[in-house]
Amino acid sequence: MDMMQIRRREQIMQQLWAIEDANPDAATLRTAAAKACEHLQALIGALDDNADPAEAGRTMRYLADCYYTGAMKKDAAALASAREAYLEARPFVERGGDLLDLAKLDFNLANTSRLIEGGRNMALMQEAKRRYYSALLIFRTQMPQGVSSVEDSLQSLEVGIRALHILKQAEQGMARTADLRRRLEQAGANPPASLLAEIQRELDGTEKADAASQIEEVQHFLEDAGPLLGNSPQHKREWETQRRQFAALARQWILGDQAGSQDWEQQAYDMVFDKLREAGESGEVTPARKEALSAVLKSFRQIQQQKPATPEEMVAQLGLMRTLINRYKGMTDRAATFGG
């Protein structure tokens, strides 16, 4: 790209960013984003095989940003176009060698992917998590002022993943319950012993599955929370020790030897809060980050302490988690993307 094309690209984006900053109505923003997409597509269409991959990649990333802006976090087709454009831009950005550009792309792609299918696609949610972590590692050294935004997004995504996991369990449980209820009604006043035995096995299995899933949820949450509390080698060693202690505690609980571990969940969360306090005292985590993560942990703990006995109660629990998501959805409700 020559300097005239680069200046034109920056002018297009500056105009769109100015409109975004003015908080216009949805129609105005969508129209502005569509015009920006059209202009950027013209620039991309003029690129040849000898174009600088860094500048080409940045232009393609900006196109994806415009699609995302026009999607207003809801339009399925625009979100799909944004994701496709980010994925097409990524090889160019990688070849360009600008790590910060790559981190911005991964962050923006994660923001996009997690919204597709209304946040119900587990594979895309997990992909978003990987891309947030990839971006976080670069921001910590290249643009520290962006770290808190990535951490906010990671925290809200983790709650979303946990909520989606519970939703899928609830849907499966509701389907099984409905099938058993239908068969029981069809059996009349004297259901066969085999059906009653099947219902009992289902109830027993639900209890065991619930215990195992609770342990799995807490263990995953601990593993995910660790990187948010610091990235120093000492921190990693200490956190791994804590994680192993919890794993041993969980195995002990599963095997039925609960002596001294009646409240294994509370012990697990105590580990997290201890590490968070230490990270705050050492300066690895800012006071604001420490306070925000503490709030997420406490809220998550309170929701998890509710033990759903039926699929319907699991759905109610999900509603509470959705409330937490809306409270801590971080970057996706503030700036749409990392621009520049």
Image (spheres, rainbow, N blue to C red):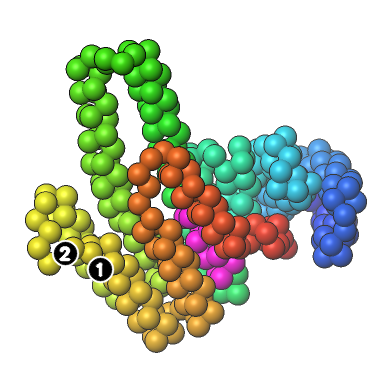
The answer to whether the residues at label 2 and label 1 have Cβ atoms under 8 Å apart is yes
Is residue 101 something that shows in the picture?
no
User: Which of 64 and 127 lies nearest the eye of the viewer?
Assistant: 127
User: Which of 16 and 309 lies nearest the eye of the viewer?
Assistant: 309
**Of callouts 2 and 1, the N-terminal one:** 2
Circle 2 crowding by C-alpha within 10 Å: few under 14, some 14–19, many from 20: some
Residue 255 as seen in the image, left or right of residue 68: left
Q: Residue furthest bottom?
A: 281
Q: Secondary structure at mark 1?
A: helix
Amino acid type at image mark 1: Gln
Residue at point 29% right, 76% down? 234
| Residue 229, picture quadrant | bottom left
**Does the magenta segment cover residue 153?**
yes
Q: Position of residue 81 (x, y in %)?
A: 71, 38
Q: Secondary structure at mark 2?
A: loop
Q: Position of residue 230 (x, y in %)?
A: 40, 73
Residue at point 34% right, 61% down? 222
Amino acid type at image mark 2: Ser
| Tag 1 residue | 267
Q: Which residues are magenta?
A: 147-159
Q: Main secondary structure of the magenta part?
A: helix
**Does the magenta segment cover residue 220?**
no
| Tag 2 residue | 261
Residue 246 against residue 198 in the figure, above or below: below
Quadrant where the C terminus sits is: bottom right
Q: Residue furthest front?
A: 189
User: Which of 105 and 282 lies nearest the eye of the viewer?
Assistant: 282
